[in-house]
Image: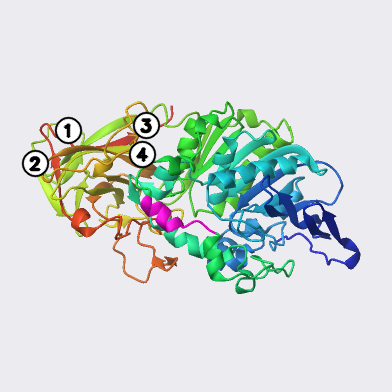
Amino acid sequence: MKRHATTKVSIAEAERIDTDNGSYKSELRDGMRIDWDVPIRMDDGVVLRADVYRPEAEARYPVLMNYGPYAKGLPFQVGYPAQWQALERDHPDIMEGSSCKYQAWEAADPEKWVHHGYACVRVDSRGAGRSEGYIDCFGPREVQDYYECIEWAARQPWSNEKVGLAGVSYYAMNQWQVAAKHPPHLAAICPFEGASDFYRDAVRHGGILSTFWMRWYPLQVTNVQHGVGTRGRTNPNTGELIAGPETLPEDFLARQRADLPNDHLNHKLDDSWFRDRSPDLSAVEVPVLSCANIGGQGLHLRGNVEGFLQAGSKHKWLEIHGLEHWTHFYTDYGRDIQKRFYDHFLKGIDNGWEKQPRVLLQVRHVDRFVERAEEEWPLARTRWTKFYLDAETRSFDENADVKSGSASFRAMEGQLTFWSEVLKEEIEITGPAAAKLFIASSTKDADVFVTLRAFASNGREVLFAAAVDPNAPLTHGWLRASHRKLDLERSLPYRPWHSHDEARQLTPSQVYELDIEIWPTSIVLPKGYRLAFTIHGKDFDHGLPEPMPKIYGIPMRGCSVFLHDDPTDRAPDIYNGETTVHTGGDRKSYLLLPIIPPKV
């Protein structure tokens, strides 16, 4: 395995540089000029800190930047050892040409990019890592800071005045935000697996609170808050505290950050608080390469697809892959498509990028992915097919002539599963899906969870390696019945859009019509397989025996850590009632699937 040769740093190669905003250290190391903790003063006087990696030769280079709260000085291998070990084991190409010691979680490996003629800039967001200030994740001040950092980078003598944004998840989500504000020197964005609608994609699925963020905040943000200091880790590349240099009292730090759990609990509707944290995608006009994960249910899929569809840019592309959440950001496959995109828009290289298909899919089969180029999403040749549910037979098919019937379950304890016929031939399902359900509840509200599943000819469920769960079903959908109101201007038959601007409680036992968005999927199922559609009132559980791998201490049981289990948001006296699903007659509940015929 080839790695880039490392070099020792001599005293002569390191220097201290003073600026109006403070000093920083600059040195030559591993074939790069590295500026550590460069101060960037914001318009309100707060000083943020950035690490800048650039080629040794004095020249002007395009900039790749990311801005966020994960501490720029925390090495991937130290902060997230299990994920790193899996990458190292399964994808050795990530280490070719790099010592990997500057690798950071969900950020570009500078050695891979600097030696390709880029300057990489990593900024600790306000209040995180080495940057002072108050933490308010995804808040308006963060977006303004990002804007100012982009413009700062464009003014530097080593910059060619073209800035591109790179990164995964958080570092993807805030790309949508800042791009909508039009920084003059922002030239391209590549949000890699990141939400674009903070309410629908991230915090409240169908109006139901996702508790992911409550677990994420202390384990990935507040543990590297600026001022943790000696209670935190040390950057092995500099010997400096990653969340320092000061060590401040815990009670002071608590006052220096937003109360994220209460913010998420208290904002139940898509109100101004959420709108301040979600961009106007139509205002995104720079070139966009949106990279999604087909297994990113719960956070890392819908936003990339909707971002691509709604972005105002005339130059936009969608790529959809599989495997783990972070994998293809680093593999040769993922870096190659990013490099061609950035080379074209940041370096002006005529590399044929404009001929790149608008949509590049890694179509999922039960045992592999197959690459296929398309020109639109959803695919124009999609056969939108309604499969009508039959409560009496617990089946679904294309026959709309179903007798009236109903079936019930206890919401937080039971479920209903409807089955397709055994497939007589191979079938491809690729695209968004939806369900129309007629339901009644014994209480004043109901949370409806739906799951699309696949079963092999031997009757065993086929589970897939998703973004952050090794055993996941095909896809999920969610809706709180009191949030059933549709925005008719934005709704599409295959993608209902709920306004989430009011809660309309149910009258117990009265039947209501619900349109449920089901996040996109892609699967080619062989002859002899069956589909199943499960309706339940709690998160899916695959039922496999323990032990299961854990994230944040949560066993992976099919939904990863994207759970909906907060007892305040889901009080059992309301959400553990009896739910009844009506089918047939004038209450034709159905599942709408995107069936894809072979390409001609």
Residue 116 position, x and y percent, is 75, 46
Q: Name the mark on residue 429.
A: 4
Q: Nearer the viewer, mark 2 or mark 3?
A: 2
Residues at discs 1 and 4 in contact (Cβ within 8 Å): no
Regarding mark 1 in the picture, which secondary structure is present there? loop
Quarter occupied by residue 221: bottom right
Q: Name the mark on residue 399.
A: 1
**Residue drawn at 62 percent across, 56 percent down:** 133
Q: Earlier in the sequence, mark 1 or mark 3?
A: 1
Residue 307 position, x and y percent, is 49, 36
- Specify start and end residues of the magenta stretch as a single range: 257-266
Count of marks, rendered view: 4
Cα separation between marks 2 and 3: 33 Å
Would residue 426 be seen by someone viewing this image from the given angle?
A: no
Residues at discs 1 and 3 in contact (Cβ within 8 Å): no
Foreground of the two, 359 or 34 = 34
Quarter occupied by residue 438: top left
Residue tagged 3: 597
**Residue drawn at 26 percent across, 40 percent down:** 424
- What is the three-letter code of the residue carrying label 4? Ile
